[in-house]
Image (spheres, rainbow, N blue to C red):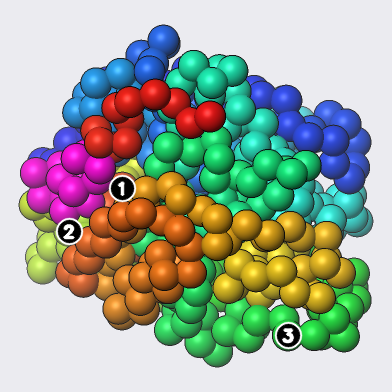
């Protein structure tokens, strides 16, 4: 079995005061899970994807801190993490969690209730301006008054945000000036996800103020939380609950018949996204493997396959990863591997308004400040899997050519899935092997001014 390395080094999770944003002040905070030395000389701040959480980095973060002297890794959870009701999971009892989240077995009279759209109208204003100000607080905290070097990294949507954050104007100081390096993991702007976004609204950047006004008007009449193609049209909290619940069963009783398979088959139409239930009886572990293989191409991993025989059929790990490695992050509480309530406005701002990181009438209307693209002179590392079909590397090169970046390391592995750079064992992980030299290089020398 391919094991889990990150579980031996639990992170230290802390809250960091965020920027003042729309809604109650109690939401003005974010969280980071800190891996590695308590007094580092450099910090890699990692931003998760959409709809992902900080625990996506549970496996790769400890490895990087062991390979790069003096490096700490801070994995970020955005402010919507506060909406997640993880009480049922904190008991570490999958049967109790199933009862709690299904409503069939309340705990002390309480059952799970998703956050209603009407309870959080202010989330419609949690766009890039709020997220980047929050992130800026984390970066400045990591810099420790200029005593430490900071590398900003991100996976998927987290990687998309990096060019825009680096170009962002923070009261006259560009975001890149606090950074020693940038690490984009299978995510960039500049058309890098054109194929992945085809057939969705994100394939079409906002070109005029009239279009931007129309999109915000539509947002005012829909959920503030994203429920798009990533989850097959289902609310993201469903995938968050399903993934963590399935993983708890896989860790607690991996070889027993799947407790969720029959329940999923009996669920009302539309509650379970299509294609998530195996066509044959499987074990708890195999149910998780199948879930991640079929939920959406943004969550696929090369962790193995369902066995050809057995009743129920077990899971066979691959040489690259395993269900247990995948689940190590999704059952981490607090700070799991999914973001149940991702703000739709953040995707609109980053993907549709700042796709090419230029100041336009649209960005001005939306209150966005990507004003310093040409000035960015921070070394770049970019890694692409097969998800972008070659477009990701092209997008990274466009970013490089549009800026003053002195050097860019661009690595591709078409055989890897979108989550594989974070979950593959290091000896079979091209990302792990190639990002370490870059981190060692940018971590040396004095911090940014």
Q: Which residue is mark 2?
A: 304
Given residues 378 and 293, the one toward you in this image is 378
Can residue 320 be spotted in the picture? yes
- The front one of 332 and 71 is 71
Residue 145 placement, left or right of 277:
right
Q: Compare residues 212 and 95 and report the one nearer the observer.
A: 212
Residue 370 image offset from top left, x and y in percent? 67, 60
Q: Name the disc covering residue 270, or none.
A: none
Position of residue 239 in the picture relative to residue 295 (left or right): right
Look at the numbered discs 3 and 2 and tell me whether their residues touch, using CB distance below 8 Å: no
Instruction: Give coordinates of residue 165: x percent, y percent.
Output: 60, 51
Per the image, label 3 sits on a secondary structure element best described as loop
From the image, give the main secondary structure of the stretch colored magenta. helix
Question: SS class of the residue under badge 1?
Answer: helix
Q: Earlier in the sequence, mark 3 or mark 2?
A: 3
Crowding near the residue tagged with mark 1, few <14, some 14–19, many ≥20 C-alpha atoms within 10 Å? many
Instruction: Determine crowd level at label 2: few under 14, some 14-19, many 20+ residues with C-alpha closer than 10 A.
Output: some
Q: Is residue 17 left or right of residue 262?
A: right
Residue 351 makes an appearance in the image = no
Residue picked out by circle 3: 207
Contact, CB < 8 Å: mark 1 with mark 3? no
Q: Earlier along the polypeptide chain: callout 2 or callout 1?
A: 2
Which label lies toward us, 3 or 2? Answer: 3
The boundaries of the magenta stretch are 426-438
Q: Residue 69 location in percent, x, y?
A: 24, 21
Q: Nearer the viewer, mark 2 or mark 1?
A: 1
Q: Residue furthest bottom?
A: 199
x 72%, y 81%: residue: 206
> Could you say which is closer to the camera, residue 331 or residue 165?
165
- Residue receiving disc 1: 422
Name the residue rendered at 49%, 16% in the picture.
147
């Amino acid at each position: 079995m391919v094991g889990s390395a990150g579980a031996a080094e639990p992170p230290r999770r802390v809250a960091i005061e965020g920027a003042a944003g729309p809604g109650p002040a109690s939401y003005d905070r974010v969280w980071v899970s800190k891996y590695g030395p308590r007094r580092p000389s450099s910090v890699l701040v990692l931003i998760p994807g959409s709809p992902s959480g900080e625990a996506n980095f549970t496996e790769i973060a400890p490895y990087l801190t062991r390979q790069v002297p003096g490096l700490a890794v801070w994995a970020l959870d955005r402010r919507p993490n506060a909406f997640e009701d993880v009480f049922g999971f904190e008991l570490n009892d999958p049967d109790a969690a199933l009862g709690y989240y299904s409503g069939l077995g309340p705990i002390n009279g309480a059952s799970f209730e998703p956050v209603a759209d009407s309870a959080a109208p202010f989330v419609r204003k949690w766009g890039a301006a709020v997220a980047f100000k929050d992130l800026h607080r984390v970066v400045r905290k990591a810099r420790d008054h200029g005593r430490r070097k900071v590398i900003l990294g991100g996976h998927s949507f987290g990687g998309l945000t990096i060019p825009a954050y680096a170009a962002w104007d923070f009261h006259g100081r560009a975001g890149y000036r606090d950074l020693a390096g940038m690490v984009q993991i299978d995510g960039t702007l500049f058309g890098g996800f054109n194929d992945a976004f085809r057939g969705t609204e994100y394939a079409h950047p906002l070109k005029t103020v009239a279009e931007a006004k129309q999109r915000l008007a539509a947002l005012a009449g829909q959920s503030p939380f994203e429920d798009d193609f990533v989850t097959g049209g289902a609310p993201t909290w469903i995938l968050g609950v399903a993934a963590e619940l399935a993983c708890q069963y896989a860790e607690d009783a991996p070889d027993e018949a799947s407790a969720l398979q029959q329940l999923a088959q009996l669920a009302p139409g539309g509650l379970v996204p299509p294609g998530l239930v195996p066509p044959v009886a499987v074990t708890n572990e195999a149910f998780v493997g199948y879930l991640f293989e079929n939920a959406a191409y943004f969550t696929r991993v090369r962790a193995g396959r369902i066995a050809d025989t057995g009743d129920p059929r077990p899971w066979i790990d691959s040489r690259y990863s395993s269900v247990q490695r995948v689940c190590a992050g999704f059952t981490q509480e607090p700070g799991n591997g999914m973001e149940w309530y991702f703000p739709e406005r953040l995707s609109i701002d980053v993907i549709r308004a700042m796709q090419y990181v230029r100041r336009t009438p649209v960005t001005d209307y939306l209150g966005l400040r990507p004003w310093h693209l040409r000035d960015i002179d921070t070394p770049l590392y970019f890694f692409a899997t097969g998800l972008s079909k070659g477009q990701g590397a092209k997008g990274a090169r466009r970013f490089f050519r549009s800026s003053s970046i002195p050097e860019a390391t661009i690595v591709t592995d078409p055989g890897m899935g979108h989550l594989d750079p974070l979950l593959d064992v290091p000896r079979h992980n091209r990302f792990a092997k190639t990002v370490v030299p870059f981190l060692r290089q940018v971590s040396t020398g004095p911090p940014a001014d």
